[in-house]
Each structure stands twice: as structure tokens, then as C-alpha cells.
């Protein structure tokens, strides 16, 4: 047997070893997702995989199908727990590994027929970083090592990541205490500006956490929670990974001075109507440009200037151009 055949046989053996804990989850229209048997009566999977609270179809490892019910939901963590109608027979504890090191790893999921799907990857360091497969079946799927030990669960709390056992247990403990954990909301809309200081906070929704804490239109956001801001989407990812009520520190630059503001994150509101939000964004941008560059010139070919000529000092303001690219409110 050559090396590739041996590796293939070993990977098949690993898949069979962990198969008793991997279930198919169908709680939405379209493709199913995956979950793990956390206990003999409970399944843990992704919040995004379950669009309803009842009649969650669970395909068990033995091929049977049962209907479960959501016991706890945490959109902030992209996590739900599903109660099974009866205990699974012959259940044994999940074989976890709390240490991850360089080596081969497997992402394992189930398709709509209950067959195992696998994606092989490589961990190049001890840090547990692994990108989820784009296939929807891998949402809520486990990541295992070459010994058939569970390393974590693929979730999408703002961005795809693997949640290791310790963090997963902490999430589940909070979920057991609260049953529903709302995703957080900061109340900022950001767009990129030509500055070495960061990004300008051009949208602060009225009465939302950031505004109440004292953030102003035109502030430059330098860091969030001690993490330097490199992209507006990064801010959204950080906020979405936290529950409502969490405190977070913003480092801002305002009029050449650096200041820190602590914000208590609120609960994320329902999405507003896109056209209304777009008009709001344009209105704020017009206000910002008017404040920094003065009002726009009068339209029309017969515009006459009265009074002494006005001389501009310094470089002329940049042309208005198209509105800068925005992100959603985070």
C-alpha cells in the first residue's frame, strides 16, 4: 500500500470514529446544515441553520430522523441548542482535544441523505484557525484532528471561525442561564477616508449606544476593544461576536486629539428599509461635506457672484464624486 492509500484509509477510519456524534440538521428552507450530539438529549448547531423554533429535523447517526425543538438561541454567537424528543441510545461523551498543533484536520458534515462529507485542511500552528467550507452543509460541523478528537465547531458569528471546546462550553453556560442572547449593536456606520488615522465615523444613529456615549460625526475610529481597526467590516465582526450589554472601549481621534470612550453595546434593532437607510446615509454625507467644504455652488448657468472676490487659502476641496462605500450599521 503506497502512502496515499494509507492516508486515505486512515482518514476513512477517523471519519467512522467520530460519525456517532455528527447529525444532520434541517431547520430552514434549502440545504441542510450539521450539528453535534452534545449529550444524549441535546444537539448543538448554528443559529443560522435554524430559522424556526419547532420541528427541527435531526438526522441521527443511525439513519433515523426525529423532530427537535430549540431550547436556547444565541444569534450573538451563531449558536443554538436543540432538545431531542427522547434520549439517544448508547451515547458516550465526545472525545475532545484541548490542544491543537500543526497537522491535518478534517471538517465533517452530513448531506441531505445523512452521508458523511469531509474537507481536509492543515493547521500550520497551534492557533486554532480554520476557514469553514463554503458548502452550506458544513455550517455547524465539527473540526477533528487525525486522531479522531474534536477540536471545535464551525460557526459564523460575524465571520467564519472554529469555536474551541472551552469557549463553546462558556457560550452554552450563558445560553443555559438566559435562553436567548441578543446580538450587540454599536450604532456606528463607517466608510473609508484618506487618512492615516483610521476611518471616519460618518453615521451615528440617534439615541443608539455610540451617540449616547459621545461619539460624533467626523470622529476617526482608531481601535475597538483594544484591536486596531483596519477595515469597516472588521468593526462589524467584532460587534456581532459580542452579546448586547457588553462594554467596549473606542479609541477615537477628534480634532487632532486622541480620546477613549467606553460604550455599553445595545441590542441590534430590526433592519430598516434599505431605501430609507440609503437616503439617511446620503443626507449625513451631504452634512459632512457641507461642514468641511462649505455649501455646494448654486446650480444653473446664470449664477452671478456679488461682492468682493473670495480667495481660497490652501488646496481646493476635492470634487464631490460618488458617495463613498458604506457598511451596514454595526
Image (spheres, grey):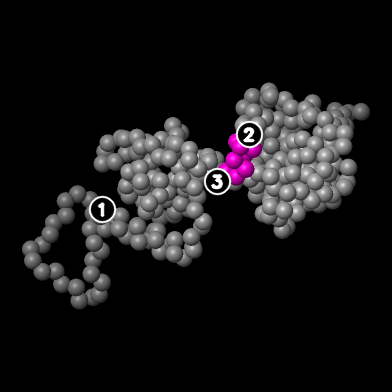
Q: Nearer the viewer, mark 2 or mark 1?
A: 2
Specify the principal SS of the magenta part.
Answer: helix
Which residue position holds label 1?
292
Q: Position of residue 278 (x, y in %)?
A: 43, 62
Q: Is residue 21 magenta?
A: no
Circles 1 and 3: CB distance less than 8 Å?
A: no
Which residue position holds label 2?
173
Which residue is rendered at x = 14% and y = 69% of the image? Answer: 305
Label 2: which secondary element: helix
The residue range painted magenta reads 173-181
> Alpha-carbon distance for marks 2 and 1?
50 Å
Give left or right: position of 320 versus 183: left
Corner quadrant of residue 326: bottom left
Quarter of the image where the N terminus is located: top right
Which residue is rendered at x = 53% and y = 41% of the image? Answer: 243
- Which circle marks residue 182 in the picture? 3
Label 1: which secondary element: helix
Amino acid at each position: 500500500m503506497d502512502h496515499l492509500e494509507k492516508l486515505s484509509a486512515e482518514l476513512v477510519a477517523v471519519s467512522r470514529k467520530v460519525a456517532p456524534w455528527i447529525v444532520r440538521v434541517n431547520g430552514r428552507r434549502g440545504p441542510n446544515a450539521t450539528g453535534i450530539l452534545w449529550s444524549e438529549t441535546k444537539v448543538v448547531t448554528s443559529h443560522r441553520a435554524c430559522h424556526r423554533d419547532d420541528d427541527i429535523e435531526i438526522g441521527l447517526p443511525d439513519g433515523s430522523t426525529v423532530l427537535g425543538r430549540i431550547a436556547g438561541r444565541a444569534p450573538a454567537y451563531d449558536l443554538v441548542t436543540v432538545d431531542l424528543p427522547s434520549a439517544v441510545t448508547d451515547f458516550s461523551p465526545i472525545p475532545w482535544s484541548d490542544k491543537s498543533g500543526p497537522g491535518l484536520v478534517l471538517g465533517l458534515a452530513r448531506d441531505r441523505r445523512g452521508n458523511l462529507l469531509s474537507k481536509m485542511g492543515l493547521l500550520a500552528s497551534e492557533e486554532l484557525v480554520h476557514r469553514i467550507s463554503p458548502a452550506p452543509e458544513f455550517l455547524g460541523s465539527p473540526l477533528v484532528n487525525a486522531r479522531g478528537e474534536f477540536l471545535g465547531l464551525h460557526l459564523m458569528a460575524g465571520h467564519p471561525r472554529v469555536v474551541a471546546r472551552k469557549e463553546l462550553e462558556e457560550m452554552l453556560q450563558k445560553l443555559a442561564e438566559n435562553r436567548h442572547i441578543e446580538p450587540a449593536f454599536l450604532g456606528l456606520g463607517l466608510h473609508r477616508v484618506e487618512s492615516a488615522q483610521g476611518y471616519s465615523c460618518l453615521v451615528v444613529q440617534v439615541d443608539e449606544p455610540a451617540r449616547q456615549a459621545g461619539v460624533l460625526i467626523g470622529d476617526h475610529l482608531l481601535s475597538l476593544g483594544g484591536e486596531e481597526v483596519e477595515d469597516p467590516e472588521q468593526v462589524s465582526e467584532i460587534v456581532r461576536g459580542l452579546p448586547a450589554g457588553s462594554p467596549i472601549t473606542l479609541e477615537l481621534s477628534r480634532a487632532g486629539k486622541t480620546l477613549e470612550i467606553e460604550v455599553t453595546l445595545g441590542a441590534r434593532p430590526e433592519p430598516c428599509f434599505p431605501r430609507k437607510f440609503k437616503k439617511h446615509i446620503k443626507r449625513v454625507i451631504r452634512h459632512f461635506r457641507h461642514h468641511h467644504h462649505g455649501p455646494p455652488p448654486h446650480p444653473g448657468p446664470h449664477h452671478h457672484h456679488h461682492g468682493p472676490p473670495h480667495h481660497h487659502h490652501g488646496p481646493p476641496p476635492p470634487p464631490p464624486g460618488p458617495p463613498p462605500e458604506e457598511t451596514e450599521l454595526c
